[in-house]
């Protein structure tokens, strides 16, 4: 893979169109393919508008030059000369598998096949191919042209040489690549779970209302959005489903247990901003509820959620899901956390974080609050974190 590689993108939805834009802006010829002609047309129109806007803002020399690198295709045969294919279609394993098998029959033997899946096993997608060693995960974040992070996920079968090659290419595309094991949620969607689930738990128990929790995490925690505002923004059809998928994929580990509060929102069709109502109402003229700006309560909330987040990051390090550097990069570049969780652990003090978790565990006797053995080893002085 190099700058002359023709890049094929399967699916011209939110992610596919964004990834295609990134590749074309990096100088590649791009074939964007979708089975839905209307979706393809929409992507063409919006890509043209976005590129024009970038030119007007002086961020792109010539939008027409970039647009000229695109081929919009309704037939998979258009991928014949591609050297890299990135799939971004519906999140259904059986459909992805059949598309990978179909594409493999069209491309050359050395074409690399990547999936942008958020939650499916790359190994199981690779297993659909005759040559699974050419398959890996390239997980971009939404919106792909703006979010720097790309998680690179080798499957069990992936040729080892592909990982550094993909890393170099992503850097050439101006991205920040991190390497992660093929486990549920990869880095970001695994480590971030408590940001949502513990916030909901605190609300369900009546410790604080959602506006107060959002205030605590933004004002005291430094996060760009509070958990309830963020879940409404992402949409409960996406955020709840990721939580449930991670939970079931982790063989029902209680640490990832979804909540009924969020499931009911999904069932009600209260998907968040996009449907006008989620945890909050977005109807015209509706006042946003006021938080209780109590610093003692706010710090309790912040420390409880933060302790669980740090525990996830430390445990991911313990299980070699990614390096310490990549774990911190993933959370700052993929979901804009104010700092990496391992760095945060060092600054706050691993002992304080462990004391918080053990306090919760002693109160609740729930496995949800069990501390990672690595955190204990760090506190005991047996290991360094960074
Ligand atoms: N939306 C996000 O925030 C996000 C972030 C990271 C990763 N992802 C992952 O990216 C993938 C795509 O997500 P999205 O949000 O862009 O979805 P989307 O619904 O916006 O777009 C999917 C597109 O794929 C097309 N498509 C469906 N089946 C096809 C097939 N067999 N062949 C060709 N095209 C087909 C559809 O017509 C549609 O245009 C999913 O795997 C998702 O998990 C999404």
Image: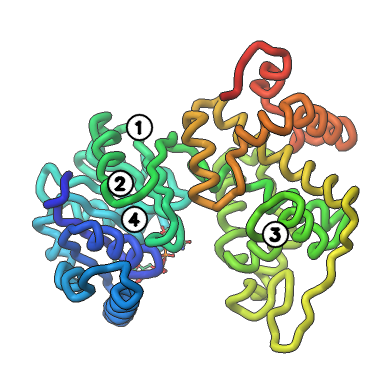
Q: Which mark is residue 279?
A: none
- Residue 251 sits in quarter: top right
Residues packed near mark 4 inside 10 Å, few (<14), some (14 to 19) or many (20 plus): many
Asked if the residue at tag 4 contacts the one at tag 2, i.e. Cβ–Cβ closer than 8 Å, the answer is no
**Residue depicted at x 73% and y 69%:** 279
The residue at which mark 1 appears reads as 156
The residue at which mark 3 appears reads as 226
Q: Is residue 288 visible?
A: yes
Q: Is residue 39 visible?
A: no
**Residue depicted at x 82% and y 57%:** 203
Please state if 44 lies on the left or on the right of 196 as rendered. left
Residues packed near mark 3 inside 10 Å, few (<14), some (14 to 19) or many (20 plus): many
Earlier in the chain: of badge 4 and badge 3, it is 4
Q: Nearer the viewer, mark 1 or mark 2?
A: 2
Q: Is mark 4 within 8 Å of ligand 1?
A: yes
Earlier in the chain: of badge 1 and badge 3, it is 1
Taking the image in four quarters, ligand 1 sits in the one at bottom left
Judged from the image, the secondary structure of the residue bearing numbered disc 2 is helix
Earlier in the chain: of badge 1 and badge 2, it is 1
Please state if 4 lies on the left or on the right of 48 as rendered. left
Give the image location of residue 178, x and y in percent.
41, 39
The residue at which mark 4 appears reads as 96
**Residue depicted at x 87% and y 30%:** 362
Asked if the residue at tag 2 contacts the one at tag 1, i.e. Cβ–Cβ closer than 8 Å, the answer is no
The residue at which mark 2 appears reads as 170
């Amino acid at each position: 893979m190099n700058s002359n590689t023709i890049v094929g993108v399967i699916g011209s939805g939110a992610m596919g169109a964004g990834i295609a834009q990134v590749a074309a802006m990096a100088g590649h010829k791009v074939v964007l393919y979708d089975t839905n002609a209307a979706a393809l047309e929409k992507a063409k129109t919006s890509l043209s508008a976005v590129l024009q806007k970038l030119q007007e803002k002086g961020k792109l020399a010539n939008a027409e030059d970039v647009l000229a690198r695109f081929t919009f295709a309704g037939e998979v045969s258009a991928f014949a000369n591609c050297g890299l294919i990135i799939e971004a279609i519906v999140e259904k394993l059986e459909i992805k598998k059949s598309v990978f098998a179909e594409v493999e029959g069209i491309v050359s033997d050395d074409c690399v096949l990547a999936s942008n899946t958020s939650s499916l096993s790359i190994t199981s997608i690779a297993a659909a191919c005759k040559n699974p060693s050419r398959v890996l995960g390239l997980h971009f974040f939404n919106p792909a042209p703006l979010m720097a992070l790309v998680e690179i996920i080798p499957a069990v079968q992936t040729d080892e040489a592909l990982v550094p090659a993909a890393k170099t290419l992503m850097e050439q595309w101006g991205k920040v690549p991190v390497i992660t094991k093929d486990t549920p949620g990869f880095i970001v969607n695994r480590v971030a779970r408590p940001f949502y689930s513990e916030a909901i738990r605190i609300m369900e128990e009546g410790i604080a209302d959602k506006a107060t929790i959002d205030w605590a995490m933004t004002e005291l925690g430094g996060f760009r959005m509070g958990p309830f505002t963020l879940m409404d923004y992402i949409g409960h059809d996406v955020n709840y489903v990721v939580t449930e998928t991670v939970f079931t994929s982790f063989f029902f580990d209680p640490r990832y247990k979804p909540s009924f509060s969020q499931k009911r929102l999904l069932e009600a069709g209260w998907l968040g901003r996009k449907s006008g109502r989620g945890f909050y109402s977005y109807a015209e003229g509706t006042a946003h509820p006021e938080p209780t700006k109590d610093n003692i309560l706010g710090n309790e909330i912040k420390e409880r959620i933060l302790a669980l987040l740090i525990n996830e990051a430390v445990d991911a390090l313990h299980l070699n899901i990614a390096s310490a550097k990549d774990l911190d990069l993933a959370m700052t570049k993929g979901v804009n956390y104010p700092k990496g969780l391992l760095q945060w652990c060092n600054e706050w003090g691993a002992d304080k974080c462990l004391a918080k978790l053990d306090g919760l565990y002693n109160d609740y006797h729930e496995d949800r609050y069990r501390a990672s053995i690595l955190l204990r080893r760090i506190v005991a002085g047996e290991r360094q974190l960074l």
